[in-house]
Image (cartoon, rainbow, N blue to C red):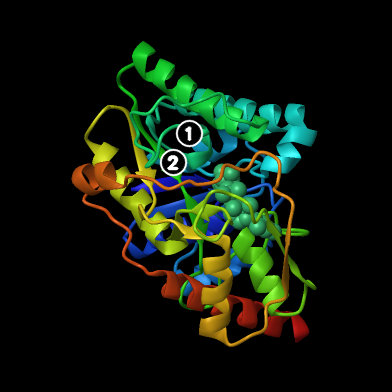
Amino acid sequence: MNVLVTGGLGYIGSHAVLCLLKSGFDVTIADNLSNCDISVHKRLEELSDKPIKLYTTDVRASLSKIFEEDKIDAVIHFAALKAVGESIQKPLEYYDNNVYGAINLLETMSHYGVKSFVFSSSAVVYGDSGLPYREDAPVSAATNPYGQTKIMIENILQDLYRADNSWHIAILRYFNPIGAHESGKIGENPVGIPNNLMPYVAKVASGELKELSVFGGDYSTPDGTGIRDYIHVCDLAEGHIAALNYIANKTGAHTWNLGTGKGYSVLEIVNTFINITGVQLPYKVVARRAGDVPVSYCDPSKAQHELGWQATRTLTDMVKDTWHWERARTADERL
Ligand code: WQD
């Protein structure tokens, strides 16, 4: 089975590509290179020992060439803008890139009769509904345009299936993916200053950034800092294979949380990082970040029961793999 992976050179996309190839799938990648390094392509071919067709294109451009040249059986759609704060500053860019991009991709798929689609959604759709987050919870009007784009696309997918029930759709709501592949060859390396906690921590630890700002120390949590459901990116990637296999012979628009069901606070992450790596990690507690919810973690049981999938890697694994990647990446950059 040949899977088109949009955003396949990005952080989560690249780990999913490697997992697909190791699971016997063939992969074609479409990526506009806006938040990744082109060298990831070669590293994926080396890691998998397989050729990977790459189309450097934006999902808003014509995608017919891909479907004309390659036999595409299914699509996993990662390509999107994903910074909450940036989306508040640039809403039109987020609606155009994320929503129109998804519509263009789905229209092309429909034209070529390709109707298996895995969508990268996010825990952000839950807003501040009751914990733990369950898939049947009402998705709120998310507090930012990024979250709105995820809700809109989920609704588009539900409407698409209602109009044409020959679609096989998986909507995957990610919690907080961190970590890196054990090889240290791929990992998270966002362009510019990281928005997310773990890549920022890693760059402070490696000396690339001076000090971590802990956004808020006055939440009603045990240590006052925000709690999130961190999941190893390789567990997340394996969840995509499980979802792809599930929808292979099932139509419908199915939604699953991909998380561990366990929450860790910012200071727990920081202290775990210091204890495991032995590095100093200067930080200061500052004001809360606009748009943050205090606590977010999921009930992962639906994916466990229906997909036969659950996260297995521990926080220690996530920190160790993050640090292994960070040291390998910075060593390469010094060459
Ligand atoms: C985690 C915790 C911050 C940075 C977002 C999106 C979500 C997904 C993941 C795309 C929070 C704190 C962070 C920092 C900090 N995006 N923090 N200092 O906000 O839970 O989720 O990214 O798929 O959809 O909403 O992740 O890593 O930004 O924050 O204290 O420099 O770390 O306040 O408590 P978040 P995050």
Horizontal relation, residue 57 to residue 19: left or right = right
Residue in the picture at 80% in, 73% down:
210
Between tags 2 and 1, which lies in front? 1
Q: Residues within 10 Å of mark 1 (few under 14, many from 20)?
A: many
Question: Decide: marks 2, 1 in contact (CB < 8 A)?
Answer: yes
State the residue in front, 248 or 282. 282
Give me the C-alpha separation between circle 2 and circle 1: 9 Å
Q: Which residue does the numbered mark 1 point to in the structure image?
A: 126
> Is label 2 within 8 A of ligand 1 (CB to nearest ligand atom)?
no
Image height of 90 relative to 292, above or below: above
Q: Can residue 60 be spotted in the picture? A: no
Picture disc at residue 277: none
Q: Residues within 10 Å of mark 2 (few under 14, many from 20)?
A: many
Picture disc at residue 173: 2
Type of amino acid under label 1? Tyr
- Using the rendered view, name the quadrant where residue 197 is placed: bottom right
Q: Position of residue 272 (x, y in %)?
A: 51, 75
Horizontal relation, residue 3 to residue 33: left or right = left
Residue in the picture at 51% in, 83% down:
276
Type of amino acid under label 2? Arg
State the residue in front, 28 or 86. 86
Where, quadrant-wise, is the C terminus in this rendering?
Answer: bottom right
Residue in the picture at 47% in, 43% down:
70
State the residue in front, 70 or 115. 115
Residue in the picture at 58% in, 56% down:
224
- Using the rendered view, name the quadrant where residue 196 is placed: bottom right
Q: Position of residue 207 (x, y in %)?
A: 76, 79
Query: How many discs appear?
Result: 2
Mark nearer the N terminus (2 vs 1)? 1
SS class, disc 1? helix
Image height of 172 relative to 153, above or below: below
